């Protein structure tokens, strides 16, 4: 019953996030799942709900997150011809964005190190 209650809390925040997403769509398009996560995060930070209220169900879902990617992987396998058509462009994008991410992360780490230890 504990897991049922915790899943119900998560589903409540998801449903409210979907409603907020629909309401904000004309001005600020945001997916309902993201809005729900932000609302849950805000509720946890403000102490509106306690961490124990959703901890076990969240841990279970996070430990089995790979299971939720199976439909996406199957969908990719169904469009393999289109995937191979754009494969060089996709690989180029992957390499370039990886290099940009590495460079930006490195610069941010250097900046933080200088900021925290200015005399060294």
Image: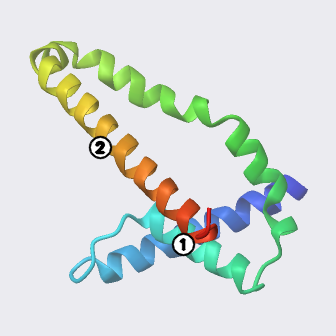
Q: Are marks 2 and 1 in contact (CB under 8 Å)?
A: no
SS type, badge 2: helix
Q: Quadrant of residue 85?
A: top left
Marks 2, 1: nearer the viewer: 2
Q: Position of residue 24 (x, y in %)?
A: 32, 82
Q: Circle 2 sits on which residue?
A: 100
Q: Circle 1 sits on which residue?
A: 38
Q: In the image shown, does 20 or 93 lie closer to the viewer?
A: 93
Picture disc at residue 83: none
Question: Dot 2: few (<14), some (14–19), or many (≥20) neighbours within 10 Å?
Answer: few
Quadrant placement of the C terminus: bottom right
The residue sitting at 12% across, 26% down in the picture is 89
SS type, badge 1: helix
| Residue 67, placed above or below residue 7 | above
Q: Position of residue 36 (x, y in %)?
A: 53, 69
How far separated are the C-alphas under marks 2 and 1?
Answer: 27 Å
Quadrant placement of the N terminus: bottom right
Q: Which sits earlier in the primary sequence, circle 2 or circle 1?
A: 1
Name the side, left or right, on which 58 lies relative to 72. Answer: right
Q: Quadrant of residue 37?
A: bottom right
Q: In the image shown, does 93 or 109 lie closer to the viewer?
A: 109
The residue sitting at 34% across, 75% down in the picture is 22
């Amino acid at each position: 019953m504990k897991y049922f209650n915790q899943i119900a809390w998560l589903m409540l925040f998801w449903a409210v996030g979907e409603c907020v997403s629909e309401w904000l769509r004309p001005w600020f398009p945001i997916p309902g799942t993201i809005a729900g996560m932000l609302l849950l995060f805000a509720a946890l930070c403000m102490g509106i709900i306690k961490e124990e209220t959703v901890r076990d169900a969240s841990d279970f879902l996070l430990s089995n997150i790979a299971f939720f990617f199976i439909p996406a992987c199957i969908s990719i396998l169904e469009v393999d011809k289109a995937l191979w058509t754009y494969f060089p462009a996709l690989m180029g994008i992957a390499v370039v964005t990886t290099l940009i991410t590495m460079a930006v992360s490195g610069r941010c780490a250097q900046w933080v190190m200088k900021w925290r230890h200015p005399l060294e």
